[in-house]
Amino acid sequence: MNSQSIKNLLQKVPLFKDLTDYEMEPIVELAKFRMYRHGTHIFMQGDPLTNVYFIHEGKVKIYKSDSHGREQIVNFLQTDDMFPHAGFFRQDNYPANASILEDAVLIYIPIHSFEDFLYTHPEICVKLFRVLGDKLVDLQKRLEEKMLYNTYEQIIMLLLRLSKEYGVKYENQQTRIATQFTNRQLANMIGSTRETVSRTVSQLKKQNLLRIDSLGCFILDTDGMKNELF
């Protein structure tokens, strides 16, 4: 992978969206890349936080495990996504596990090298903090959903959020979530059970707010779902 390919990817990542080509050049010089096979782990929860990763190809699952080995899925990531989001500004360990769902090519930047670079470029720090502020707002909204809404509403909000991240416009003003998610995976994202998600999906089908295509992808009536919340 050449430096131009690395720059093209990094400039798609929200963290770097406001940087000029000139500002990107030293960042590209810090970046490296590596291939990962399906089923392998990039890092484990509690490992020393050393790199921040960007997905060039493939898919990644971010999850935590409790003392009984049960998974709590934090996120599913795909091309152009970055993780962990706060990695550049923490002296800590990785907060979750990251495993490869689909053969992947990842670009990564060593944290110590990037932070040394930021010490001498405060104007870039300001731009990066603005983007991270937007991410904090998103996480706050997710916490509010957990506290203020019942499980039925949380599942609808999750599907709407996934439609924004992975959705493509479909016929009759519907949205198709291009990435497949099982009921178990959806349940793990909000700390619910597979049975509860299954009942909710069935209910949404009866209301013609959701259907599943031949590939197992969700097709949503997003306007109708929003009306269920308000």
Image (cartoon, grey):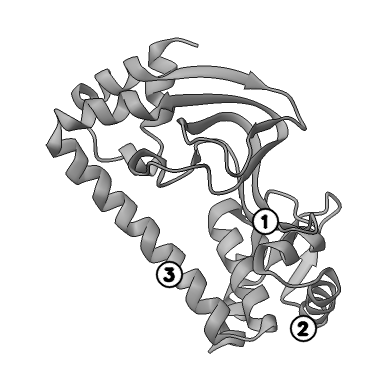
The percent position of residue 81, horizontal first and vertical second, equals 50, 40
Dot 2 or dot 1: first in sequence order is 1
Q: Which residue is mark 2?
A: 207
**Dot 1 lies on which element?**
strand
The image shows residue 208, relative to residue 30, as above or below, that is: below
Viewed as shown, does residue 87 lie left or right of 37?
A: left
- SS at mark 3? helix
Which amino acid type corresponds to the residue marked 3 in the rendered image? Answer: Gln
**Which residue does the numbered mark 3 point to in the structure image?**
140
What whole-number distance in Å separates the C-alpha atoms at marks 3 and 2? 30 Å
For the residues labelled 2 and 1, the Cα–Cα distance comes to 28 Å
Rendering quarter of residue 20: top left
Q: Quadrant of residue 55?
A: top right
Residue placed at 81% from the left, 61% from the top? 184
Pointer 2 local density, CA inside 10 Å: few below 14, some 14–19, many at least 20: few
Query: How far across and down, in percent of the image, does residue 78 sit?
Result: 59, 40
Extreme bottom residue here? Answer: 230
- Please provide percent x and percent y for residue 178: 68, 49
Disc 1 residue type (three-letter): Ile
